[in-house]
Amino acid sequence: MSLKTIAIIAALLLLGIGFNLYQQQQLPKNTLQPLNISNASPAKIETEPLTVYITGAVQQPGLYHIPKDTRVVDALSMAGGTQPQANLEKVNLAAKIKDGQRIFVPAKKARKSRSSTETSPPITAININHASAKTLSQIPKLSVKTAAAIVAFREKNGPFLYLDDLTKIKGIGPKTLEKWRPYLSL
């Protein structure tokens, strides 16, 4: 750095300090008045707990008194946590709680179970060109009579080339075939 640059920086620094001192001398003395606390009303400080109602898929539903600025996740912990079937994707766990709020934790919807008359699909699909009527009748909603008709058609006309050929049999339409398709193979 050159001597000229250092001199300019020093001059600017001295100028700034001098301006600051000048401003301090221009301020009037004792301009601040003391605050009379005895006449002032106290500011309302919210120290009272919030009251919330926690319900749904929680361990201990009910009314809870919780501190201000509590989040939903913390309130659920106060309610003993959630039940295993709780659907937490439907709850904003990060939301701050307000007084009088209701926190509802929905349960996951139960999956529809198959009726006792239905059977699950076989691990491997049944080959309609080799299966017996008894084997074919294990397919859900395929009666023994229809299974016998499939075997009779196959014996008369030869092996099926396409699954859609089943619609050539009386009583089997496209909608019925679509129900059976996951259970069938060639």
Image: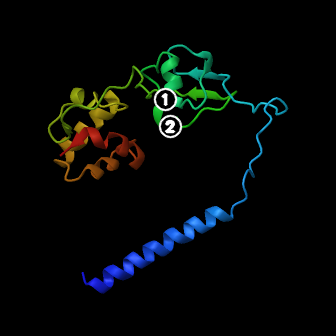
Asked which secondary structure carries label 2, the reply is loop
Q: Determine whether 28 is above or below 167 in the image.
A: below
User: Residue at horizontal 61%, vertical 17%?
Assistant: 64
Q: Quadrant of residue 103?
A: top right
- Nearer to the camera, 52 or 159: 52
Distance between the Cα atoms at labels 2 and 1? Answer: 7 Å
User: Residue at horizontal 57%, vertical 65%?
Assistant: 21
Judging by the rendered image, the residue that carries numbered circle 2 is: 94
Residue 57 lies, in percent from the top left, at: 52, 21
Residue 113 lies, in percent from the top left, at: 41, 25
- Is residue 162 in view from this perspective? yes
Q: Residues within 10 Å of mark 2 (few under 14, many from 20)?
A: few
- Is residue 170 in view from this perspective? no
Residue 71 lies, in percent from the top left, at: 53, 31
Residues under numbered marks 2 and 1 in contact, where contact means CB atoms less than 8 Å apart: yes
Q: Residues within 10 Å of mark 1 (few under 14, many from 20)?
A: some
Q: Determine whether 23 is above or below 145 in the image.
A: below
Answer left or right for 62 relative to 163.
Answer: right
Q: Quadrant of residue 144?
A: top left
Amino acid residing under circle 2: Ala
User: Residue at horizontal 68%, vertical 65%?
Assistant: 26
Residue reaching furthest top?
A: 60
Amino acid residing under circle 1: Val
- The numbered disc on residue 73 is 1
What sort of colour scheme is used for the picture?
Answer: rainbow
Residue reaching furthest right?
A: 39
- The numbered disc on residue 15 is none
Residue reaching furthest left?
A: 130
User: Residue at horizontal 30%, vertical 43%?
Assistant: 181
Mark 2 or 1, nearer chain start = 1
